[in-house]
Image: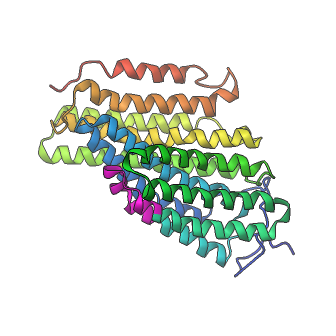
Amino acid sequence: MSDHPAVTPWSWRRRMRPRDPEETQRVSTPLELLFDLCFVVAIGTDSARLEESLAEGHTGSGIASFLLVFFAVWWAWMNFTWFASAYDADDTPYRLATMVVMAGVLILAAGVPRAFDDRDFAVVFAGYLVMRIGLESQRLRAAAADPERRASLMRYAAGESGCMVLWAVAIFAVPDGWRLPVWLVAAAAELLVPPWAERARSIPWHPHHITERYGLFTIIVLGETILSASRAVQEGIADEARLDLYLVAAGGLVTVFALWWVYFSLPSAGLLTRTRAAILWGYGHYVVFASGAAAGAGIAVNAALATHHAHVSRTAAGLALAVPVLCYLTVVWWLLVRPHGANAPYAWGMPLVGLLTLPASLTPRPYP
């Protein structure tokens, strides 16, 4: 009898065989859904900090901190998601190791305020260390059970462990003036690990499972956008109910609906036919996820301006929403729509609408 987790009951321990990339009815597991929820706090805190920075006029430093922190959050999710698509054994050791990874995510989330405000990534590093302990133990377990892909899995383990050394140097061992350049080098090294490891032998991730996982994370990001905007509107209503505040809320809700609509207009699994295409598709979603979260901050800034709680111009508030929407639409079009050909819905309309958001941010507002 096969010990494949999709066709046998749950057991204490089973051999960690690679999953079939053509397995039918492969969907996200309850454990994966719980894993995703651990990222809600980190994304929400990062987005809220961005809104505060933009509302106070600290645009440059706020955007830089937001992108640095969001990279740490996104990359932690990426590492686990692709491995789980290939080697989810759903037994006791796998579940326990995944829960260790989740504990690391929560530690990471606790370090987001310090990382954003002071560029102090010490707590984030501790979270990553815990996550890597859980994940690399599973990579080594898979390497022992899958000799055909052992070289690739060992490259992953060695590369990611080496990157932890770079992160330690960037965070603890270099002067403040050199910290950001070394941080960027460490981030680049992280991005190079998957292409290098996959050259030895491709890991059998499941295209439909991967696209579903990315879709669910997109929903989480947009949900955080709705939450941050709703919180800003609630605070404004507590002070003074204004028609322009309701207009901002309605416009923000329509914006989120539109962002959801365009992302889920076309299937994506058929686009992940080659490793190189899959890596570019996966990496490109950093912009999709980050811009989706930033859009929530932009809506909140406009709500704060409507109630005179933001210290920025109308143009700056408009751009706080328009720029993330432009980035989101452009990259979604590039990754998910353009590959389907010129006859696909929104073939050229999506980037055009994205560009129109910039002059729209300069139009007169109903509030003084």
The x and y percentages for residue 65 are 38, 44
Above or below: residue 129 compared with residue 40: below
Depth order, front residue of 161/115: 161
Q: Quadrant of residue 294?
A: top left
Q: How is the image coloured?
A: rainbow
The x and y percentages for residue 250 are 32, 35
Which residue shows up at 45% across the image and 28% down it? 326
Left or right of 277: which side holds 115? left
Which residue shows up at 58% across the image and 65% down it? 132
Depth order, front residue of 157/49: 157
Q: Is residue 229 highlighted in magenta?
A: no
Above or below: residue 66 compared with residue 328: below
Magenta residues, start to end: 106-125
The x and y percentages for residue 179 are 43, 48
Left or right of 174: which side holds 56? left
Quadrant where the N terminus is found in the figure: bottom right
Which residue shows up at 49% across the image and 33% down it? 328
The x and y percentages for residue 366 are 20, 24
Q: Is residue 119 highlighted in magenta?
A: yes
Depth order, front residue of 241/50: 50
- Main SS class of the magenta portion in the image: helix
Q: Residue furthest left?
A: 240
Q: Quadrant of residue 338?
A: top right
Asked whether residue 7 is in view, the answer is no
Quadrant where the C terminus is found in the figure: top left
Left or right of 42: which side holds 283? right
Which residue shows up at 32% across the image and 51% down it? 118
